[in-house]
Image (cartoon, grey):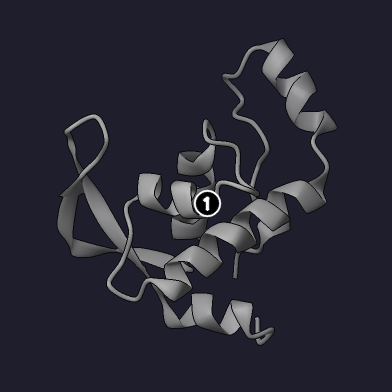
């Protein structure tokens, strides 16, 4: 199973400045952001768009990075797309994701 620590902080194609910045990010901060987003999904069983989850978790998650952390949660299998979409603040449709049993287990300390 993929864990929070297994996720890369940067892509191989990122510029050196992004790589350097990512290497300076404390791992605990990323884990805190992932947990804050996962708790948002847990509290909203009907599901959330990445943007909605980012707004709910905004005290912990930077408003410009929520989609990356939500993508990480999908990669780990802690949230998954539902079959619905909702409009974002830009007016575009976005997928709605829901927390999975693995996500619930992670929050309960079972993973």
The relative height of residue 40 versus residue 17 in the rendered view (above or below) is below
Measuring from the top left, give residue 85's x and y in whole percent. Answer: 17, 53
Q: Quadrant of the C terminus?
A: bottom right
Q: Is residue 66 left or right of residue 85?
A: right
Q: Secondary structure at mark 1?
A: helix
Q: Is residue 56 left or right of residue 4?
A: left
Measuring from the top left, give residue 50's x and y in whole percent. Answer: 38, 48
Q: Is residue 25 left or right of residue 79?
A: right
Q: Nearer the viewer, residue 10 or 83?
A: 83
**Residue shown at the point (44%, 67%) measured from the top left:** 41
Residue 6 makes an appearance in the image:
no
The residue beneath circle 1 is: 72
Measuring from the top left, give residue 102's x and y in whole percent. Answer: 50, 79
**Residue shown at the point (48%, 64%) measured from the top left:** 40
Q: Quadrant of the N terminus?
A: bottom right
> Badge 1 local density, few (<14 within 10 Å), some, or many (20+)?
many
The relative height of residue 29 versus residue 20 in the rendered view (above or below) is below
**Residue shown at the point (43%, 54%) measured from the top left:** 53
The answer to which quarter of the image holds residue 22 is: top right
């Amino acid at each position: 199973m993929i864990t929070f620590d297994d996720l890369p902080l940067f892509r191989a194609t990122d510029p050196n400045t992004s790589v350097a910045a990512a290497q300076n990010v404390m791992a605990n901060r990323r884990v805190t952001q992932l947990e804050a987003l996962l708790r948002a999904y847990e509290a909203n069983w009907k599901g959330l768009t990445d943007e909605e989850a980012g707004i709910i978790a905004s005290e912990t998650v930077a408003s410009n990075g929520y989609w990356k952390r939500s993508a990480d949660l999908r990669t780990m299998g802690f949230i998954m797309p539902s079959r619905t979409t909702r409009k974002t603040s830009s007016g575009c449709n976005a997928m709605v994701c829901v927390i999975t049993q693995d996500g619930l287990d992670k929050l309960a300390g079972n993973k």
